[in-house]
Image (spheres, rainbow, N blue to C red):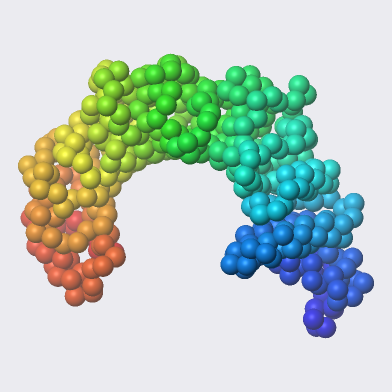
C-alpha cells in the first residue's frame, strides 16, 4: 500500500469506488489519510446474502449475523459523514429473529436520500410485504431507481415528484394502477428507460403506461389474469425499443407505438376465442427490427383477426421455429414485409417445414440460421431456401454448441455444394 500513498487523492478515490464496499471500508484503518479518502467514496453496495449462506447451517448464529451486518452498514454510513452519495445498492434478505429489519432498511434508504443519492438499487426480501419510505417518491436527485421487493403501495405522497428520474426498474413492486397512471408517471417528466416485471403470483393489475418521454420500454406480465380488460397499455409514442411479454389480451385499444424501431414480442396463448392482437401489431407496424418468440408465432396465427398489417419499414426479422405454425406464418410475414433484407431463423430441424412457401418477390439479402447441427433435414431446408431467394448475398450459419470441428468441416462442405439461384459470389459463413 506504500507505493499507492504517492498517488493523488482523486486517483485513490476512483480506486476505492471500484472496490467492493467491505474492502473499501477496510482501507480506512490504514491511516488518517485513507480514512478521509473513504468518506469521498460515492458508491456503496451492501449485500447480506453471503453472510446468510455462511450461517444458514447454524441457525443459532443467524441473530448475531444479522446484528453484525446491521453494525457494518451503520458504521460504514457513519464514516461517510455528510458527504454526497452517487450510488447506493442494498440487497437484503430478512433473517430469523431480526424483528427490526424493515426499520433498519428504511433508515438506510433515508440516509442515502438525505445525501443526494442519484442511483438507488433495492432488492429486499422480507416475510411480510415491504413498504418503502415515501421520501423515495419526492427525491429531486434520483436518476436511476430500481425496486425489487414484494411490495404494494396503495397511496403515493400528494407532493410526489421525481424531476431527475431517467431509469426506472420495478420487479414485483406494485402501485395502485390509477395512482400509477395519474400520479407516478406524470411525476417523472424525464423518464427514458422503464422496465416492469410481474411474477405469476403478483397481486397488481397491468399498468396503463402513458408517457411521451419513454424511449426504451420492457414489460413482462406473467399473470394470466385481467386479459379481458380493455386497458390502454401503451400510450407511449416516443418508445423506440420495446420488449413485451404477456398472455394474449382481448384487445389493445389506442396502442401508440408508432416510433418503435426495434421490438421483441413474447406473447403466450390462452384458450380464449376473444383474444386479438391486431391492434398491437398495427401499433408497431413502423418497426425496423422484429423478434418473434415461438409462442408469439402461434398467437399471431390464431389471434390476429384483422389480418397481419403491412410492415413497410421492416428490414430484419428474427423467427423461432418450435411450433408447427411457423410454416404458415413465415410466408405471410414475407408477403407483408416487402423491404425485408435480413432473416434470422432457428428450429430448422422439423419435419413440418418441408415444402414451406417462399414468396418469389422476397428481397432477403442475408439469411442467418441459428443452432445449426447439419442434419439431413436441415440441409434439405437450406436447399429449399437457397433455391428461392434470388437476392441472397450472405448466409450465416451459427453452429450448435455441441457440434465438433470435424462435423463443422463436413456441414460446411455440404452447404457449399447446394445449388442456388444467386450468383456464384454467395458468401457462406459458418461460425
Q: Nearer the viewer, residue 127 or 1?
A: 127
Residue 307 lies, in percent from the top left, at 25, 21
At a point 40% along the width and 23% down the height, the residue shown is 227
x 17%, y 40%: residue = 324
Q: Residue 142's spot in the image, x, y percent?
A: 73, 40
Q: Which image quadrant is residue 391 in?
A: top left
Front-most of residues 175 and 344: 175
- Tell me how many marks there are: 0
In the image, residue 316 lies at what x, y percent?
A: 33, 41
* Direction from residue 54 to residue 105 in the image, left or right: right
Whether residue 273 can be seen here: yes
Relative to 93, residue 315 above or below:
above
Foreground residue among 173 and 382: 173
Lateral position of residue 219 relative to residue 2, left or right: left
Which residue is drawn at the image coordinates 64% and 46% (left, top)?
A: 126
**Quadrant of the snapshot with the N terminus:** bottom right
Amino acid at each position: 500500500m506504500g507505493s499507492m500513498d504517492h498517488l493523488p487523492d482523486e486517483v485513490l478515490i476512483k480506486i476505492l469506488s471500484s472496490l467492493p464496499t467491505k474492502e473499501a471500508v477496510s482501507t480506512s484503518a490504514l491511516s488518517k489519510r485513507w480514512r478521509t479518502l473513504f468518506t469521498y467514496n460515492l458508491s456503496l453496495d451492501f449485500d447480506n446474502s453471503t453472510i446468510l449462506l455462511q450461517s444458514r447451517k447454524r441457525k443459532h448464529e443467524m441473530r448475531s449475523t444479522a446484528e453484525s451486518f446491521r453494525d457494518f452498514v451503520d458504521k460504514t454510513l457513519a464514516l461517510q459523514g455528510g458527504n454526497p452519495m452517487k450510488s447506493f445498492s442494498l440487497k437484503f434478505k430478512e433473517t430469523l429473529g431480526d424483528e427490526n429489519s424493515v426499520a433498519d432498511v428504511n433508515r438506510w434508504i433515508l440516509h442515502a436520500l438525505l445525501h443526494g443519492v442519484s442511483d438507488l438499487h433495492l432488492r429486499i426480501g422480507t416475510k411480510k410485504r415491504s413498504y418503502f419510505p415515501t421520501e423515495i417518491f419526492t427525491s429531486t436527485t434520483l436518476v436511476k431507481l430500481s425496486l425489487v421487493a414484494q411490495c404494494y403501495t396503495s397511496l403515493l405522497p400528494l407532493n410526489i415528484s421525481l424531476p431527475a428520474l431517467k431509469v426506472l426498474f420495478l420487479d414485483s413492486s406494485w402501485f395502485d394502477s390509477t395512482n400509477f397512471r395519474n400520479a407516478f408517471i406524470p411525476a417523472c417528466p424525464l423518464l427514458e428507460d422503464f422496465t416492469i416485471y410481474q411474477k405469476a403470483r403478483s397481486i397488481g393489475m397491468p399498468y396503463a403506461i402513458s408517457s411521451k418521454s419513454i424511449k426504451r420500454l420492457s414489460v413482462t406480465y406473467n399473470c394470466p389474469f385481467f386479459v379481458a380488460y380493455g386497458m390502454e397499455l401503451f400510450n407511449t409514442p416516443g418508445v423506440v425499443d420495446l420488449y413485451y411479454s404477456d398472455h394474449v389480451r382481448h384487445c389493445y385499444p389506442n396502442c401508440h407505438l408508432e416510433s418503435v424501431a426495434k421490438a421483441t414480442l413474447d406473447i403466450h396463448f390462452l384458450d380464449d376465442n376473444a383474444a386479438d392482437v391486431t391492434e398491437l401489431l398495427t401499433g408497431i407496424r413502423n418497426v425496423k427490427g422484429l423478434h418473434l418468440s415461438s409462442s408469439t408465432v402461434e398467437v399471431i396465427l390464431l389471434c390476429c383477426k384483422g389480418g397481419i398489417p403491412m410492415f413497410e419499414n421492416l428490414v430484419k426479422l428474427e423467427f423461432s421455429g418450435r411450433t408447427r405454425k411457423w410454416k404458415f406464418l413465415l410466408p405471410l410475414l414475407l408477403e407483408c414485409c416487402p423491404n425485408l433484407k435480413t432473416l434470422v431463423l432457428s428450429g430448422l430441424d422439423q419435419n413440418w417445414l418441408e415444402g414451406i412457401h417462399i414468396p418469389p418477390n422476397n428481397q432477403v439479402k442475408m439469411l442467418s440460421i441459428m443452432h445449426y447441427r447439419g442434419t439431413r433435414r436441415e440441409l434439405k431446408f437450406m436447399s429449399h431456401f437457397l433455391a428461392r431467394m434470388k437476392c441472397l448475398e450472405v448466409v450465416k450459419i451459427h453452429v450448435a454448441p455441441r457440434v465438433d470441428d470435424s462435423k463443422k468441416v463436413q456441414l460446411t462442405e455440404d452447404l457449399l455444394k447446394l445449388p442456388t439461384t444467386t450468383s456464384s459470389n454467395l458468401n457462406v459463413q459458418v461460425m
